[in-house]
Image (spheres, rainbow, N blue to C red):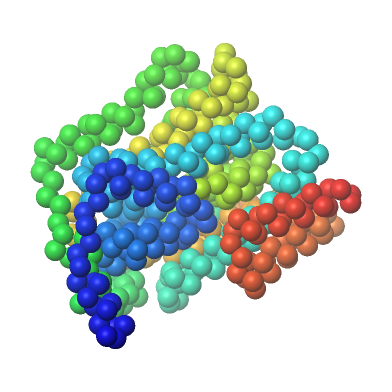
């Protein structure tokens, strides 16, 4: 009997429908192992759910992913929520989305506590010196990865360049850039669809048998179901604001955290890397919650934990509340700040999925919306490039000047202050990532070790 025949016979055996308990164990496993940012997390889910367990077909997996890419927030967590919803309804979606976040949240809070207590010790300072140099290369790799996918022609390249200049040169608000890019893609795809839309080759009939395939449909949501979804998840979103406002006052740091990160939950198209440029600008320059180097430290911490990379926002919330005058023990205030930030970052994700998932086919078939998504993705390349340059200036140069020319105002390096050790560690990280294709965890471990070595020698 040939191998091909054996495979065909195996594929004819329909996969079983997992119980909620079995699915929960798988979602917990994915949450614990989901290192490597969105690309690694999506690859892990594909391996576990499409290739090994055949709970969802390749087409439906990509179908769900494309829908999640249209939404603000971390697409990997939303993809888990959506597939959980397909398998077991709302309960399954809540379990999948929550287990995807909890391991990383616990780790990032513990690391935030250690950072707040031991930030100024020589050992930790040396470790983070190396980690920051490594994070710089990881962000550059993200620019290249997203750019290859998004910049298909000169129009997309122009959108990316415009987004970069708007942020770096004119300091325009991140939400304005995203909305503008969406408008260009929405209307541009109607007039010139060949510039904004890409055709995908179908693979119908070539997929292995899967539980969730093209015939697997969830009941369409009614208007009453949609209204209940908005009331429930909208209420859960707003409830902490009322609580912290009444307990700590409406001018407290907790109200500020709720307001700022609720805004982020609405405009964070393009994932964590895209929004970090705006968060860094606001948290560092506007609110003064962190120093630029501490923002880079937070990203380094988030890179070493499982779960969505956007959990770096929990680090920001912890540090902001830890340093504020709240009447609470600083450590307790920090944990509360991190919890509040995480809550308002991820609760809206459940709202978007449970409200919009029933209409996924209609959304994906809309060419104008697909064009808007393509333009947003192109703008995200420019946003991430701005983040990479922002990180590079703060990691590699001790002193920065400001160049002003009319409405343009940008940071420029003082070349005599370049840190050759940081540059060397970044070069090693580049070799490890691009030449030897090591994982992010291994790259950061090498960079942290080199930072300690540099501290001992220096």
> Which one is nearer the viewer's eye here, 404 or 378?
378
When asked about the image quadrant of residue 231, the answer is top left
At x 44% / y 39%, what residue is drawn? 102
Q: Position of residue 456 (x, y in %)?
A: 86, 48
Q: Position of residue 174 (x, y in %)?
A: 47, 49
> Which one is nearer the viewer's eye here, 393 or 302?
302
Q: Is residue 72 visible?
A: no
Q: Is residue 270 visible?
A: yes
Q: Position of residue 57 (x, y in %)?
A: 26, 65
At x 54% / y 62%, what residue is drawn? 142
Q: Residue furthest front?
A: 1
At x 30% / y 47%, what residue is drawn? 22
Q: Position of residue 3 (x, y in %)?
A: 31, 83
Horizontal side of 441 relative to 11 (left or right) equals right
> Which one is nearer the viewer's eye here, 163 or 429?
429
Residue 414, placed above or below residue 257: below
């Amino acid at each position: 009997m040939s191998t091909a025949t054996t495979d065909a016979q195996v594929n004819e055996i329909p996969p079983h429908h997992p119980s909620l308990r079995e699915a929960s164990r798988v979602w917990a496993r994915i949450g614990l192992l989901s290192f490597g940012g969105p690309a690694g997390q999506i690859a892990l889910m594909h391996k576990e759910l499409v290739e090994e367990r055949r709970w969802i077909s390749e087409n439906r997996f990509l179908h769900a992913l494309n829908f999640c890419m249209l939404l603000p927030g971390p697409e990997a967590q939303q993809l888990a929520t959506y597939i959980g919803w397909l398998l077991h309804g709302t309960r399954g979606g809540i379990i999948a989305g929550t287990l995807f976040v909890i391991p990383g949240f616990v780790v990032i809070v513990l690391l935030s506590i250690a950072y707040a207590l031991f930030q100024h010790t020589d050992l930790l300072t040396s470790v983070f010196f190396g980690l920051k140099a490594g994070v710089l290369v990881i962000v550059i790799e993200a620019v290249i990865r997203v750019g290859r996918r998004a910049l298909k022609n000169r129009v997309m390249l122009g959108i990316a360049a415009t987004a970069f200049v708007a942020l770096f040169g004119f300091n325009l608000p991140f939400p304005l850039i995203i909305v503008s890019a969406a408008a260009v893609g929405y209307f541009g795809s109607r007039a010139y669809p060949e510039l904004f839309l890409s055709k995908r080759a179908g693979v119908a009939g070539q997929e292995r048998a899967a539980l969730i395939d093209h015939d697997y449909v969830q009941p369409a949501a009614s208007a009453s179901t949609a209204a209940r979804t908005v009331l429930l998840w909208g209420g859960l979103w707003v409830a902490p604001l009322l609580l912290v406002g009444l307990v700590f006052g409406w001018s407290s740091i907790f109200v500020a955290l709720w307001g700022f990160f609720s805004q982020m939950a609405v405009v964070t198209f393009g994932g964590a890397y895209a929004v970090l440029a705006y968060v860094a600008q606001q948290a560092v320059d506007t609110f003064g919650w962190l120093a630029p180097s501490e923002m880079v430290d937070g990203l380094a911490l988030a890179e070493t934990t499982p779960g969505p990379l956007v959990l770096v926002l929990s680090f920001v919330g912890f540090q902001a509340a830890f340093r504020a005058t709240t009447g609470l023990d600083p450590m307790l205030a920090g944990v509360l700040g991190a919890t509040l930030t995480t809550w308002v970052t991820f609760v809206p994700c459940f709202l978007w999925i449970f409200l919009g998932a029933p209409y996924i086919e209609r959304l994906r078939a809309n060419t104008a919306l697909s064009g808007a998504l393509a333009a947003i993705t192109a703008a995200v390349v420019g946003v991430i490039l701005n983040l990479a340059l922002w990180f590079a200036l703060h990691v590699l140069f001790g002193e920065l000047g400001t160049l002003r020319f009319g409405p343009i105002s940008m940071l420029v390096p003082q070349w005599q202050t370049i840190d050759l050790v940081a540059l060397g560690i970044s070069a090693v990280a580049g070799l490890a990532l691009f030449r030897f294709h090591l994982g992010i965890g291994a790259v950061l471990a090498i960079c942290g070790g080199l930072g300690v070595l540099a501290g001992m020698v220096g």
